[in-house]
Each structure stands twice: as C-alpha cells, then as structure tokens.
Amino acid sequence: MYIHLGEDTLVKSDNIIGIFDLDTATVMKSSREYLKKATKEKRIINVSYDLPKSFIVSAEDDYRVYISLLSPATISSRAKNKSRRFE
C-alpha cells in the first residue's frame, strides 16, 4: 500500500522506516546531524511548502528523507488504516 505524505507524494508503506516529529526529534543532536547529512547528500525531499511537522525516513534509494506538513500521528494513522483494510 502507499501512504500519502503531502502534495503529490506517495511512499510505499513497506519502505517506511520511521516517522518523526520535527519539533521533538531535532532537540537531539544526533537527529539534527542526521538531517544535516541527508541534506548534504541530497536525500531530502520537501513535500510541503508550509511549516513542516514531520520527517519520514524511507528505505528507497539510499534512505530518502521526506519533510511533510502532516503530523506524525496523521501519517501513522493513514498507515494503520491502510493495513487494516485487507485483514
């Protein structure tokens, strides 16, 4: 299944490694360094032109990082709802 992250961006749910809140995750130095490194390596895809609320790490193409205006709770809920449809 695919999860909508914002704008016209869909990510395969099986590829999602983690969904993180930007406000709380960037408090930690390791998270800031990870995002900085991903930026340098051009692995960040911004799917929002508004104030971002989350970042999603995906296993596709050397671990892409999506920046989204959707909250982590919204994205997690979408992922759970999609997986329940076929139970």
Image: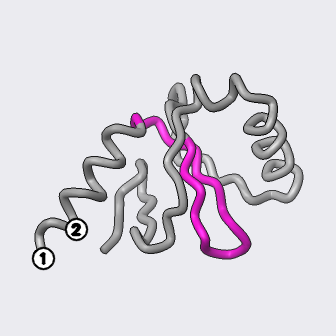
Q: Which residue shows up at 42% across the image and 58% down it?
A: 8
Mark drawn on residue 86: 1
> x, y percentage for residue 52?
54, 31
Q: Which residues are magenta?
A: 55-71
Label pair 1/2, CB-CB below 8 angstroms: yes
For the residue pair 15 and 6, the one nearer the viewer reads as 15
Q: Which residue shows up at 59% across the image and 56% down it?
A: 57
> x, y percentage for residue 4?
36, 57
For the residue pair 8 and 16, the one nearer the viewer reads as 16
> x, y percentage for residue 26?
68, 28
Say which amino acid is labelled 2. Ser
Q: Residue beneath label 2, please?
A: 83
Task: Check the image and report above or below for 2 versus 47.
Answer: below
22 relative position to 13: left or right: right
Magenta stretch encompasses residue 63:
yes
Task: Check the image and report above or below for 79 versus 33.
Answer: below
> x, y percentage for residue 14?
43, 74
Q: Which residue shows up at 62% across the image and 31% down it?
A: 25
Mark drawn on residue 62: none
Q: Which residue shows up at 53% across the image and 54% down it?
A: 18
